[in-house]
Image (cartoon, rainbow, N blue to C red):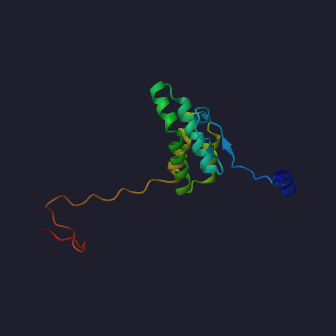
């Protein structure tokens, strides 16, 4: 009786196969951690920068610390790229980087393209009068 139910179902797996997101197999995968997905240029840049930084590190203790922080590094670089809308030229530079010197050169290009915002002005020293019209009262 059970056999007839199984035969009647005639369950066949779907023939349409979904494409998994592209991944880069890194040392994280070898260490048992999930590989980092690389669906867009900014994520690929994060993976690339982290890999170069880690591979260029010669101090074993520092290298181990970087390996543990790899995912956070990738996320940070990727988010910066996305949030700051890096130009195609800067993205191409980072994607083509092969070593720390290349990363440094790309970082200089990035700094030229996206200069940092000016720092906010310092508050007036304690005991000084607030500028008129600032809405601040002096005690």
Residue 121 horizontal/vertical position (percent): 30, 59
Residue 71 horizontal/vertical position (percent): 54, 42
In this view of the protein, can residue 80 be seen by the observer? yes
Q: Give the number of callouts.
A: 0
Residue 15 horizontal/vertical position (percent): 84, 53
Q: Is residue 7 above or below residue 48?
A: below
Which of these two is toward me, 8 or 49? Answer: 8
Q: Is residue 132 above or below residue 20?
A: below
Splitting the image into 4 quarters, where does residue 125 fall?
bottom left
Indicate left or right for 98 with 116 as reference: right
Indicate left or right for 113 with 133 as reference: right
In this view of the protein, can residue 59 be seen by the observer? no
Residue at x 56%, y 43% (from the top left corner)? 106
Residue at x 69%, y 49% (from the top left corner)? 21
Q: Is residue 4 above or below residue 30?
A: below
Which of these two is toward me, 86 or 58? Answer: 58
Residue at x 24%, y 74% (from the top left corner)? 133
Indicate left or right for 18 with 114 as reference: right
Residue at x 56%, y 57% (from the top left corner)? 85
């Amino acid at each position: 009786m059970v056999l007839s139910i199984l035969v009647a179902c005639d369950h066949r797996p779907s023939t349409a196969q979904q494409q998994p997101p592209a991944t880069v197999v890194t040392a994280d995968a070898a260490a048992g951690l999930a590989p980092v997905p690389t669906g867009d240029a900014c994520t690929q840049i994060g993976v690339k920068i982290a890999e170069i930084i880690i591979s260029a590190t010669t101090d074993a203790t520092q290298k181990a610390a970087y390996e543990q922080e790899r995912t956070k590094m990738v996320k940070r670089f990727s988010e910066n790229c996305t949030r700051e809308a890096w130009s195609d030229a800067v993205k191409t530079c980072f994607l083509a980087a092969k070593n720390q010197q290349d990363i440094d050169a790309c970082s200089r290009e990035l700094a030229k393209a996206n200069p940092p915002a000016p720092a906010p002005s310092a508050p007036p020293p304690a005991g000084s009068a607030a500028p008129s019209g600032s809405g601040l009262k002096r005690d």
